Amino acid sequence: MRPRVELLLSLNLVSVHAAPQKPGNGLSYINPLIGTTNGGNVFAGATLPYGLAKASADVDGQNTGGFGLDGSNVVGFSSVHDSGTGGNPSLGNFPLFPQICPDDVLDNCSFRIGDRKLHYVNGSVDARPGHFGLQLESGVVANMTVSQHAALYRFTFPKESGGSKSHPLILLDLTDLWQSRQNASIQVDDKSGRMTGNGTFLPSFGAGSYVMHFCVDFFGSSIYETGVWVNNRAGTEPKEVFLTRGFNLFFLEGGGFVRLDPPSDGTATVRMGISYISSQQACQNAQREIPSPLKAFDSLVSNAEKAWEEKLSPISVKGGGATDDLLTSFWSGVYRNMISPQNYTGENPLWHSDKPYFDSFYCIWDSFRVQHPLLTILDPHAQTQMVEALLDIYKHEGWMPDCRMSLCKGWTQGGSNADVVITDAFVKNLSSTIDWELALDAVMADAENEPLEWSYHGRGGLHSWKSLNYIPYLDFDPYGFGTNSRSISRTLEYAYDDYCISELAGGLGRRDLQAKYQGRSMNWKNLWKADQTSLINGTDTGFKGFFQPKYLNGTWGFQDPIACSALAGFCSLTTNPSETFEASIWQYLFYVPHSVSSLISLLGGDDAMISRLDFFHTSGLADISNEPVFFTVFLYHYTGRPALSTERIHQYVPASFNSSPGGLPGNDDSGAMGAFLVFSVMGLFPVAGQNVYLISPPFVEGISIRHPVTGKTATVRNVGFDASYKNVYVQSARVNGKPWTRSWIGHEFFTEGWTLELVLGAKESKWGTELKDRPPSWSVSS
Ligand SMILES: *[C@@H]1O[C@H](CO)[C@@H](O)[C@H](O)[C@H]1NC(C)=O
Ligand SMILES: *[C@@H]1O[C@H](CO)[C@@H](O)[C@H](O)[C@H]1NC(C)=O
Ligand SMILES: *[C@@H]1O[C@H](CO)[C@@H](O)[C@H](O)[C@H]1NC(C)=O
Ligand SMILES: *[C@@H]1O[C@H](CO)[C@@H](O)[C@H](O)[C@H]1NC(C)=O
Ligand SMILES: *[C@@H]1O[C@H](CO)[C@@H](O)[C@H](O)[C@H]1NC(C)=O
Ligand SMILES: *[C@@H]1O[C@H](CO)[C@@H](O)[C@H](O)[C@H]1NC(C)=O
Ligand SMILES: *[C@@H]1O[C@H](CO)[C@@H](O)[C@H](O)[C@H]1NC(C)=O
Ligand SMILES: *[C@@H]1O[C@H](CO)[C@@H](O)[C@H](O)[C@H]1NC(C)=O
Ligand SMILES: *[C@@H]1O[C@H](CO)[C@@H](O)[C@H](O)[C@H]1NC(C)=O
């Protein structure tokens, strides 16, 4: 039952115990199957960093990312996927399915999903960077790997089921994982077996539709016969089919097939090119990247391994006795951080540009907090291209996305959080090639221009935002339309987004704009209801003062502060829409990242903030499975008690993260959960949009990170580390040998390659407690 990759890992780990880790040794720890059950929705298949081609088996169980280790049936093998997302299964277009037709009769083969689905042999799953393989219960072994825009499959047919005499069939199904196809067509070339075609599909969490093109070639044996299939019947004439949605949008199943002469070694090799431009480009991509398919499999796998090794190479970990489970979670988290966004440069049919084009920003509401900050550290080159892509999207579509997939606008969850991504890049001097004036235009479009349709870009309620300084409950907004809920969470997010704009404007010398947006960044205070209480099952929690919805006329509305928490039920855009998004008022209480000191004052001081945080984290109100919780784990730093942040993260990491298939607490969200684990282990938590990392001792003896641009190596090292985590309290700290009393540090740590030493002890100390040593907070008087 245990996937083969885990055996490989335990073998590798033997040597790791003996010697401290060497740089670049992360590859052997990666387990792509983490998060493939229990709602992690992780993509487990083969991909290059940010690759467009992502090959895996697709199942009929947990299949949002294609494959799930939940014991469900395999329905096909497909070449494009997203990773970790929620909602509808994403992509999985044009799956292939190999089989032997009983008695070698075409009509005896199974075509529809319901007929052809098949379990895999337990324990046969072999997932590692650049490779995915399993054996179907039919005996067919499927192995797959990828280049940037193409996938290569090897289907090995069993000898005993007539594999040596039968003519194996490989079908292509004109569908995707959630059967969103509108229409599609396929042509099969009788001589070569080449299949080309396209389909129009719907984005899994967005508006509009997209067209995808494919080009499939067969190698390893000559073509026996070809044709198309519709429903459960196939024929060798005609050689093409055009499918639509019929009566009541009924979903018709169909596609093409090829049967091969018995391959001498039992293996059919299939190459699939993908393009968003044309099927000709899909063929060209495949031919250019995989010119010799019969010889290419192993070298593609090793190319992928090298590409991943290179991406991991800035990091080097000294475990100091930390468990293999923790190290596996750590390295796999780094790996998953670079699966998406996906590099669609050269594959954007929407506009011509010399800028990079990235897609699958899925969603920025999840990724702005820790995923993009981690990319900024480990792969500033890629993060720069992603920022440039966001700005190019603004230039051609008028707004940056809050979410985007498959060339389509994704639904906005909170604010316009690309503003935070842009500012985070600016305050960390990400790159001098970014056009910062264009960036200022882009973030100001979010802040100033309300689009007619604001459910997929920009912000809603801007008229009220500017005149009333909050987003009203049941706002009257005849200027634009969107899901008119979330007035509290939108107020909080817009406020922080505006703060980020003020930082960018200030940095560009625009003092007028800086002051204007600083002012707006304090709008969150307008929803503070000082006498609001919170009851759980009729018992007063004893806390007074919460955010509450406020009508246009200034009268308070009401939302129970525990509503939308794990204690009271889920709220999303269309599920139980409420004044907070996917989290409670209790959770959003803590979302004032730019002005935590003001929040602490409102609550009544440090101790009041600490009791709020403690209650939140221990009452079942905190939801570790969703991104808003991340910052709250480390918020104790702002009360002068960094030790309490450390205690908190030492509860969450062992309780909610491990290296098993169910080892993530919720959706990985394109790597966001993984990035949270990575930063927690590293002991530096980024406050996205600010040049601030909150310091807490790493879960390992030390971590070094070589900056890919400056080449300098930053090191954080525990002095007195013990892997049983009794000594987790910082007694004193040094940076480059000099005392460091602040509980936070800036990005210069990484770019300049500083060394941070943390002397540990078994009890909380005075370190980081003084006002001057707390992380920065902006306030009106400052
Ligand atoms: C394979 O595993 C699944 C669940 O993971 C189980 O239901 C099934 O019985 C197993 N099959 C065999 C042949 O052991
Ligand atoms: C295969 O098809 C033939 C002809 O239709 C039929 O006689 C035979 O029973 C089928 N075999 C199986 C195993 O279904
Ligand atoms: C192909 O996949 C099978 C099943 O997972 C695995 O045992 C085998 O090692 C893989 N072959 C290659 C060349 O990776
Ligand atoms: C296919 O479907 C799309 C989306 O519904 C539509 O725009 C397009 O015209 C259709 N194409 C054909 C050839 O019917
Ligand atoms: C899809 O393929 C059909 C058939 O070759 C072709 O007529 C159509 O133009 C293609 N659609 C797109 C968007 O390229
Ligand atoms: C994205 O793809 C383009 C075109 O292939 C390439 O030039 C660029 O370096 C890629 N970006 C990254 C971060 O790999
Ligand atoms: C960014 O550049 C400025 C000006 O050179 C410098 O003062 C600042 O320290 C740099 N910030 C970072 C995070 O490297
Ligand atoms: C509230 O009461 C219900 C019913 O008695 C109980 O199931 C639930 O656990 C209680 N919730 C809390 C947070 O105490
Ligand atoms: C403000 O509007 C709300 C909602 O329409 C209403 O219930 C309330 O009575 C109004 N308050 C005043 C003072 O008019």
Image (cartoon, helix red, strand yellow):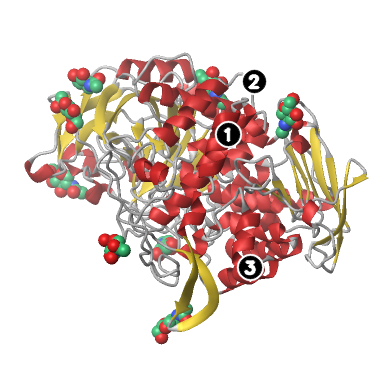
Q: Amino acid at mark 3?
A: Gly
Q: Is residue 231 visible?
A: yes
Name the kind of residue labelled 1 in the image.
Gln
Residue 524 vs 264, above or below: the answer is: below
SS at mark 3 in the image:
loop
Residue that sits furthest to the bottom in the current view: 539
Outermost residue to the left: 247
Viewer-proximal residue among 481 and 303? 481
Classed neighbour count for the residue bearing mark 1: other residues with Cα under 10 Å, few (<14), some (14–19), many (≥20): many
Mark 2 and mark 1: span between their CA atoms? 21 Å
Q: Residue farthest to the right?
A: 737
Decide which of tag 3 and tag 2 comes sooner along the chain.
2
Residue 705 at what x, y percent from top left? 75, 38
| Label 3 C-beta lies within 8 Å of the nearest ligand 8 atom | no
Count residues near mark 3 (Cα–Cα under 10 Å), then give few for <14, some for 14-19, many for 20+: few
Circle 2: element type: loop
Q: Nearer the viewer, residue 137 or 350?
A: 350
Residue 523: image location, x then y, percent: 49, 49
User: Is there any visible trace of residue 30 in the rendered image?
Assistant: no
- Read off the residue under disc 2: 432
Q: Earlier in the sequence, mark 3 or mark 1?
A: 1
Q: Is residue 5 above or below residue 253?
A: below
Pinpoint residue 550: horizontal percent, then vertical percent. 38, 59
Residue at which label 1 appears:
514
What amino acid type is highlighted by mark number 2? Ser
Estimate how packed mark 2 is, as few (under 14), some (14 to 19) or many (20 or more) residues with alpha carbons within 10 Å: few
Tag 2–tag 1 contact (CB < 8 Å): no
Mark drawn on residue 604: 3
Secondary structure under tag 1 reads helix
If the image is split into quadrants, where does the C terminus sit? top right
